[in-house]
Amino acid sequence: PDYDIPAARAYGSYQELIQKETALPADQRIDFISVTTPNHTHYEIAKAAVLAGINVVCDKPMTFDLAQAEELAKIVDGSN
């Protein structure tokens, strides 16, 4: 199924999603991303999204280890 996603909003990677969504006017951007990829990728995707100003809902585990969790928490605390 295509989930009714317009072709212009179907991205091949999280990097492309972040790049193209942040280029849109604020009122047209996504509200958040949901990270439901394999566990070892959660940190890099969540970090990139937060740094780009995109809200994140992350499947558990949030990160792969405590050091990543602490760094991500600092990044989130410093964001809007």
Image (cartoon, grey):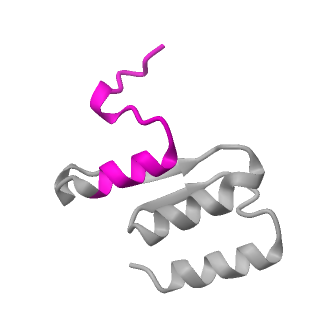
Left or right: where 24 falls relative to 34: left
Say which residue appears at 38% left-offset and 78% top-offset. Answer: 80
Query: How many numbered tags mark residues here?
Result: 0
The answer to whether residue 64 is above or below residue 36 is below
Percent across and percent down for residue 58 are: 61, 56
Percent across and percent down for residue 35 are: 59, 49
Magenta segment range? Answer: 1-22
Nearer to the camera, 74 or 14: 14
Image quadrant where residue 45 sits: bottom right
Say which residue appears at 81% left-offset and 76% top-offset. Answer: 66
Q: Is residue 30 visible in the rendered structure shown here?
A: no
Say which residue appears at 78% left-offset and 79% top-offset. Answer: 67
Q: Is residue 26 visible in the rendered structure shown here?
A: yes
**Residue occupying the far top of the picture:** 1
* The magenta stretch spans residue 18: yes
Say which residue appears at 20% left-offset and 49% top-offset. Answer: 28
* The magenta stretch spans residue 13: yes
Image quadrant where residue 60 sits: bottom right
Percent across and percent down for residue 13 are: 50, 41
Percent across and percent down for residue 11 are: 42, 36
